[in-house]
Amino acid sequence: MGLLDTSYAAYYGFTVDQFSLKGNTAVISGGVRGLGFAFAEALAEAGANIAILDIGTPQAGSLEKQVNEVVETIEKEFGNVDVNINAAGVATDEPFLATSDKNLSSTFNVNFVGSFLVAQACANSMVRKWEKLGKPELEDAPRIGSIIFISSVAISAPRPLRWNWPNTVSGQFAVPWLNTNGHDEKVEQTFPDLLKQFNQESMFGRVGEPEELKPAILYLASGTWKTGQDLLVDGGVSSWKHRGNW
Ligand SMILES: NC(=O)c1ccc[n+]([C@@H]2O[C@H](COP(=O)([O-])OP(=O)(O)OC[C@H]3O[C@@H](n4cnc5c(N)ncnc54)[C@H](O)[C@@H]3O)[C@@H](O)[C@H]2O)c1
C-alpha cells in the first residue's frame, strides 16, 4: 500500500489532497541518511521539492549568515520554504559524570544551534511568503508553513544510556529507537545488549524502521489547524511497561 493510498484514505474518511505537498519547498537538515532521508522520501512522494542540508566542508565566517544565504538560494530556485524538518543530529558516548564540555558544546552546536539557525532562516522565508500574500490575518491565512524538530523518546521515558544523554537534553517529534545508520552502528558495536533491550521495550518486540515514521511526518508537514504539537510515535515504548501475553 502506498503512502497516499486512496482506498485507505476513503476508509478513514479523509481526502489524499489534505496530505498533498505538491509544489511545496521542503528544507530537510540531516537528510543524507537515516530519519532525514526517509522524511525526504515521504515529502517527495507527496509532491514536494526537496532541498537537503547536511555535513559539508566547513567555511570561514558567520554560520548564521551562511545558513541564511543557503536558504535564500533555495528560495530563489524553488520558491519560499513551506516545510522545514530538522533531523540533523549527533549522539556521543560519554557518561554523565564525566561528560566533557567539548562533547557538550559540539552536541549542542549540531542538535540545538544548527537546528535553531536552519529553522530561523526557514521561518524568515515563510514570513516573506506571508508578506507576498498581503499579510493576511491568522484566521484568514492559508497554510504558511510547517517547522518540525526531531527529538527522542528519552525526553518522556528517561533511560540509562550514557552515550545518549547530551543528545536528549539538547533534544528538540519525539521518536523511539530506530534502525538508522547512526544509532545502529553505535548500539551494535559499543553496547551489544542494548539492541536486545530496545527491541524488548517496544510493544511490537522490535525497534522501528525509518519508513514507519513517514505517515507521521506527512501529517505534521501538511494540512491546517496544527501548531505547537508534540507527536510521539514510539512503538508503544512509553505506553507499555511490559509486553506481556494477551
Ligand atoms: N535513530 C533513532 O533511533 C533516533 C532516536 C531518537 C532520536 N533520534 C534523533 O533523530 C535525529 C536523526 O537521527 P538518525 O538516526 O537519522 O541519525 P543519522 O546519524 O543516521 O543521520 C544524521 C544525519 O545528520 C547529519 N549531520 C550530522 N551532523 C551534522 C551537521 N553538523 N550539519 C549538518 N548535518 C549533520 C549526518 O551527516 C546524517 O546525514 C538525531 O537528532 C537523533 O538524535 C534518532
Image (cartoon, rainbow, N blue to C red):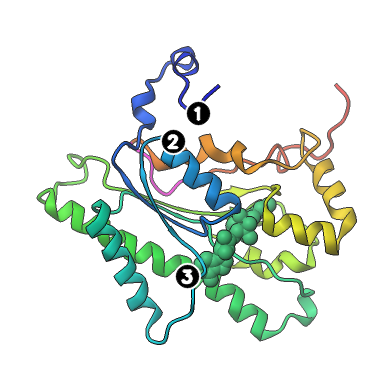
Q: Label 2 sits on what residue type? A: Glu
Chain part drawn in magenta: 224-229
- Report crowding for label 3: few under 14, some 14 to 19, many 20 or more residues within 10 A (C-alpha): many
Give the structural element (helix, strand or loop) at label 1. Answer: loop
Taking depth in this image into account, of 89 and 244 the one nearest to the observer is: 89
Report whether the residue tagged 2 is closer than 8 Å to ligand 1.
no
Location of residue 67 (image quadrant) = bottom left
Cα separation, mark 3 vs mark 1, equals 30 Å
Q: Image check: 32 left or right of 142? A: right
Q: Name the residue rendered at 33%, 60% in the picture.
A: 122
Instruction: Identify which amino acid the numbered label 3 is placed on.
Output: Gly
Q: Is residue 238 magenta?
A: no
* Horizontal relation, residue 156 to residue 126: left or right: right
Location of mark 2 (residue): 45
Task: Identify the residue position indicated by label 3 in the image.
Answer: 114
Q: Which residue is mark 1?
A: 3
Classify mark 3 as within 8 Å of ligand 1 or not, answering yes or no: yes
Are dots 1 and 2 in contact, CB under 8 Å?
yes
Q: Position of residue 226 (x, y in %)?
A: 38, 41
Q: Secondary structure at mark 2?
A: helix
**Residue 171 in view here:** no
> x and y percent of residue 130 in the render?
18, 52
Residue nearest the observer in this picture, 145 or 66: 66
Residue 17 picture quarter: top left
Count all numbered tags in the image, as a single digit.
3
Judge the density around disc 1: few (<14), some (14-19), many (≥20) Cα neighbours within 10 Å.
some
Q: Nearer the viewer, mark 3 or mark 2?
A: 2
- Eye-nearest disc, 1 or 2: 2
Query: Which mark is nearer the camera, 3 or 1?
Result: 1
